[in-house]
């Protein structure tokens, strides 16, 4: 019986794992943008939202935006 660590290592890098991380980045970014006051929350909100959108792009297209621009 494989251990939980082996199962987690097999799960890393799969499409569901990438979708979960993209959703977490987007949710964190949007939460910081709309529900937290202050300049620091704005900076983190924009940063996490951009990273989340780039992760969704990579998930849908299958390559990063840098690879898309370079080709």
Image (cartoon, rainbow, N blue to C red):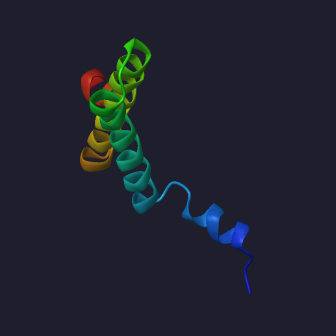
Q: Number of labelled discs?
A: 0
Residue 71 in the figure: left or right of residue 13: left
Question: Toward which corner of the image does residue 5 lie, by quadrant?
Answer: bottom right
Q: Of residues 18 and 23, which is closer to you in this image?
A: 23
Residue 47 x, y percent position in the rendering: 38, 23
**Quarter that holds the C terminus:** top left
- For this view, does 60 lie left or right of residue 39? left
Residue 69 screen position, x and y as percent = 25, 23
Residue beneath the point at 39% across and 30% down? 48
**x and y percentages locating residue 38 in the rendered image:** 38, 16
Q: Is any part of residue 18 visible from this angle?
A: yes
In-image side of 66 versus 12 (left or right): left
**Which residue is nearer to you in this view: 57 or 61?**
57
Residue 54 occupies quadrant: top left
- Report whether residue 64 is seen: no
Decide: is 29 above or below 12.
Answer: above
Residue 9 figure quarter: bottom right
Judged from this view, the residue extending furthest toward the bottom is 1
Q: Determine whether 71 is above or below 16 in the image.
A: above
């Amino acid at each position: 019986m494989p251990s939980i660590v082996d199962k987690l290592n097999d799960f890393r890098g799969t499409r569901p794992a990438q979708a979960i991380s993209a959703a977490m980045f987007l949710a964190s970014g949007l939460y910081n943008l709309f529900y937290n006051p202050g300049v620091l929350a704005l900076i983190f909100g924009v940063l996490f939202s951009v990273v989340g959108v780039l992760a969704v792009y990579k998930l849908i297209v299958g390559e990063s935006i840098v690879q898309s621009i370079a080709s």
